[in-house]
Image (tube, rainbow, N blue to C red):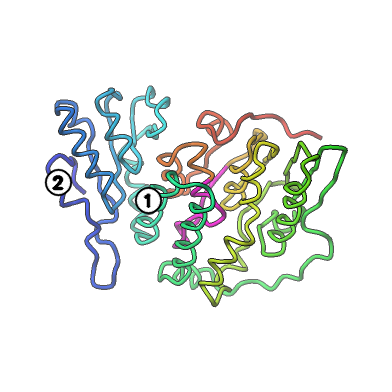
Amino acid sequence: MPDSGIDLFDEFAVQLTADGTPATPMVVVALDAFGRETPDRIARTAERMNQALPLVIGVLRGPVTPGLTPLLAAATLTLAADATANSVPQAVVVDDIDAALELLGAAVRHSPRAAVACGQLLRQTVRLPTVPALAAEAALYSMLLGGTEFERWLAERGAPRTVAPPEHALVRTHRDNDRLTITLNHPQRRNALSTRLREELLEAVRLADLDSTLTTVEINGAGPVFSSGGDLDEFGTATDLVAAYLVRLDRAPWRIIDRIRDRVTVRAHGACIGAGAEVAAFAGTVIAAPDTYFAFPELRMGLVPGAGGTVSVPRRIGRWRAAWLMLTEQRLTAAAALEWGMVDAVEQTRS
């Protein structure tokens, strides 16, 4: 990988191999080298970075200076060593930049098609209203379901388990005057967002959408975690990918949650993985217990977040830090989530 992007514009292409795999899914640009460049040169470089097809990873070993702002904004994300960069949403401060680059590179090499697609999608969704952004995500997610990287993950996972569906409701609702409490109620499966749970959640949030007298809507999870994400035993069952795309749009509780977000509070605890984190981020207020953590495992599966995460998460923490989490599967603790804006408060879970 190049150590400077000043004269290496040709590297901003993915250079597909014969089977369509990106040979250059990630380009590293040493941003410190631009400290001596003119504003015009920086602006032209930033424009090329904005148009790049691969992931463009900035590396900043020194302090953030105002002149570098266009480059940080144009990159997919920037790894920084200076702690003062914590206040810059385009930067991810790490203890060891070289180790972080290796972590990121290994994840991208494992699923280069999904990685490039994720980077491009995040550049689009931040510019679009909610429904068109969700449509872009659903289209890409459904396309990747037919890809070789997802096929590989399915083979590595092995046959899905056969689990008897529970007789009780997977989503509980309780109304108290103008307050509606919605509880994800499948702790035996760590509140995994199965088709059935998704449908029951959709009906619950529709109730809140239709009844304007419900001024407060709280969503929480029963058991030790808020939600472990999508039900992995249902992955790979879609046979019609166009239908899968339409279902992801039409049967999406997160679309309704976004519409009533000013009335919605999510109380998260324990694991908020994949879809669990994505849905939570749509709420107007997210309160996390101290043991909460967020993680996005989709890239390892050859996918991108598919429950609205490329829409909801960047709106909270910016597309750059969202890219870091989605590309690396690194856990975001409750304390770090508060610092980044993924949650609005950290409080002990109410008894």
Residue span colored magenta: 294-311
119 horizontally vs 61: left or right: right
Residue at x-position 61% and y-position 59%: 230
**Which residue occupies the foreground of this view, 48 or 290?**
48
Q: Does the image show residue 183?
A: yes
Q: Mark 1 = which residue?
A: 119
Q: Secondary structure at mark 1?
A: helix
Quarter of the figure that contains the C terminus: top right
Amino acid type at circle 2 is Leu
Above or below, comparing residue 78 to residue 163 in the picture: above
Spot occupied by residue 75 in the image (x, y as percentages of width and height): 31, 41
Above or below, comparing residue 261 to residue 164 in the picture: above
Mark 1 → mark 2, Cα distance in angstroms: 20 Å
Above or below, comparing residue 227 to residue 63 in the picture: below
Callout 1: 10 Å neighbours few (<14), some, many (20+)?
Answer: many
Q: Mark 2 = which residue?
A: 8
Residue at x-position 71% and y-position 61%: 199
**Which residue occupies the foreground of this view, 140 or 108?**
140
Q: Does the image show residue 267?
A: no
Spot occupied by residue 149 in the image (x, y as percentages of width and height): 41, 67
Spot occupied by residue 226 in the image (x, y as percentages of width and height): 68, 46
- As drawn, which residue projects farthest toward the right? 177
Q: Quadrant of residue 144?
A: bottom left
Residue at x-position 26% and y-position 50%: 52
Q: Is residue 310 magenta?
A: yes
